[in-house]
Amino acid sequence: MAEPKRKSMPVLPWMRSPVDISLFEECPLNLLPSLDSRLEEALKNMGISSLFPVQVAVWQETIGPGAFERDLCINSPTGSGKTLAYALPMVQMLSNPAVKCLRALVVLPTRDLALQVKEVFAAIAPAVGLSVGLAVGQSSIADEISNLIRRPKHEAGVCYDPEDHSQIFQSSVDILVATPGRLVDHINTTKGFTLEHLRYLVVDETDRLLRESYQSWLPTVLKLTQLTDVISSHLKDFLPSTLGSFKTIRRLGVERGFKGKSYPRLVKMVLSATLTQDPSKLVQLDLHHPLFMTTGQRRYQLPEKLESFKLICESKNKPLFLVALLQTLSGEKCIVFTSSVESTHRLCTLLNFFSDLQIKIKEYSGLQRQAVRSKTLKAFREGKVQVLISSDAMTRGMDIEGVRNVINYDMPPYIKTYIHRAGRTARAGQAGRCFTLLRKDEVKRFKQLLQKADNSSCATYPLPSDSIQSLHSVYISALEKLKENVELETSKKRKFNSKSARPGSAKGKRTKE
Ligand SMILES: Nc1ncnc2c1ncn2[C@@H]1O[C@H](COP(=O)(O)OP(=O)(O)OP(=O)(O)O)[C@@H](O)[C@H]1O
């Protein structure tokens, strides 16, 4: 008899005795201890009447007895409500500010994700006198600066030191939601942008953000928030100019939860549905006495009400199976994931040549301009588009109401990819289905991959064979059209590239944002 597989033990000792989020229960707002009544009202306006388990658990460690004493590392399934889990206690702690200054920073890997998180803050923060800003490069840097920094009118007769930015610039926001690249731009170049007063740092989708350096945003932020005024006077002349305004040194002070320290500790919360346990990655965060919070015993969890199915077919018949599947799903909102931006484009073009398919299908990928992506996303949210063909640009964090199905057109290479893709459905306790199209030779590897997650059973989805047969002739003609389309696009691209390469050509000078 085969020996049962041993669970892998985290290397870091503090990860071995986590708080188990699954032991917490939903809590009605009126029973949540110490919740500010204005926030309760704001939550009700959002349609929220109780907090989810991860939100209750984090509340206990922040506003409750935990009192923000420790940095929190939160591993909780997709759609379990992690955004509000960190947003709510931070907003409550920062409520009724005496002066406006940037005190909370939330970093996310993509613009669309940052926009989504900003909406959550914007729904609760104004209720307690806080404002939220966005630094994602969606608008011009000048527009962004004017939304983030205020320059108060000078009073007559008062002398101002032009070098002292704190006298002439003021933050317009208390909370900033940012992508790493734009954040570094502001740190380096925006006059008056300061992390001097920062009290909370959230690194959402931590494992994704720690995978790349993104212009060294993390060491930069940590450096700027760790230095004290005392050190500053000695180091001032030696810091590289890339660290931007030296006004980002934090002020001295004492606050609750930072016993024995003469300056406020920067509280960090890091989160993911697949939080890394790699010490070499986590060390970059410089966590203070971290507390690991996770759901259940298994490292990887899928949403409780997610059903997983597989469809086995030959490579060349994949489009046919996909079309037949989409027909059986009869217009339900659906995201189809492919392995690359190129195959996203090709598949979307091909599907739109299936004339009988009465479904609005659009692509969403990193190859497109942000404006196009945002427009597509809006149409998908509003239900004007029913099927989104996406590269992994949509994999993480995106919360779109009513997505009932996720289809892996290409098998996800890792369990983490499966979890994040599948997690676009079955959110907030709703039911959802994840279908994966597989070649015969992929079945075994896919089974092994799913075994790494809880509730990993995956039945074969029964597609009636006549539904596939009937599509053959349309498929042949759609393929022909796709071929013509690819040729046309290739020749257009060639022409564009040769024009761009000409010396003095305006297009040749265009740079990517
Ligand atoms: N207490 C609540 N009651 C009802 N709905 C909630 C509650 N908290 C969050 N939600 C909703 O649940 C959905 C998922 O929340 P959220 O996006 O924060 O999940 P997540 O855990 O961050 O997921 P992911 O790991 O995919 O980023 C959102 O639509 C959100 O509005």
Image (cartoon, grey):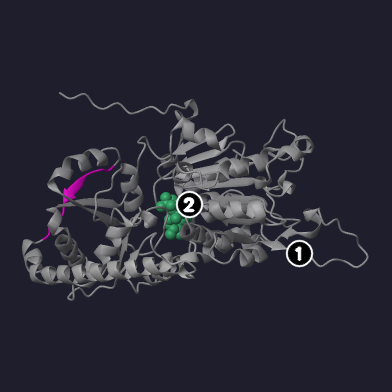
Instruction: Tell me where residue 29 appears, x and y as whole percent.
Output: 53, 55
What range of the chain is rendered magenta? Answer: 455-463
Q: Quadrant of the N terminus?
A: top left
Label 2 or label 1, whichever comes before in sequence order: 2
Instruction: Tell me where residue 445 appears, x and y as whole percent.
Output: 20, 40
The reply to whether callout 2 and callout 1 are in contact (CB within 8 Å) is no
For the question of whether residue 267 can be seen, the reply is no
Is residue 457 within the magenta segment? yes
Instruction: Tell me where residue 47 appears, x and y as whole percent.
Output: 48, 64
Q: Choose between 280 and 37: the one closer to the eye.
A: 280
Q: What residue is rendered at 57% in x and 63% in y?
A: 122
Q: What residue is rendered at 58% in x and 48% in y?
A: 33
Element carrying mark 1: loop
For the question of whether residue 43 can be seen, the reply is yes
Label 1 residue near ligand 1, CB within 8 Å: no
**What amino acid does circle 1 point to?**
Arg
- The image shows residue 72, relative to residue 430, as above or below, that is above
Element carrying mark 2: loop
Instruction: Tell me where residue 361 appears, x and y as whole percent.
Output: 29, 70
Name the side, left or right, on which 380 lies relative to 287.
left
Query: Cα distance, mark 2 to mark 1?
Result: 30 Å
Is residue 174 within the magenta segment? no
> Residue at label 2?
109
Q: Quadrant of residue 289?
A: top right
> For ligand 1, which image quadrant applies?
bottom left
Name the side, left or right, on which 301 lies relative to 51.
left
* Badge 2 density bin: few <14, some 14–19, many ≥20, Cα 10 Å: many
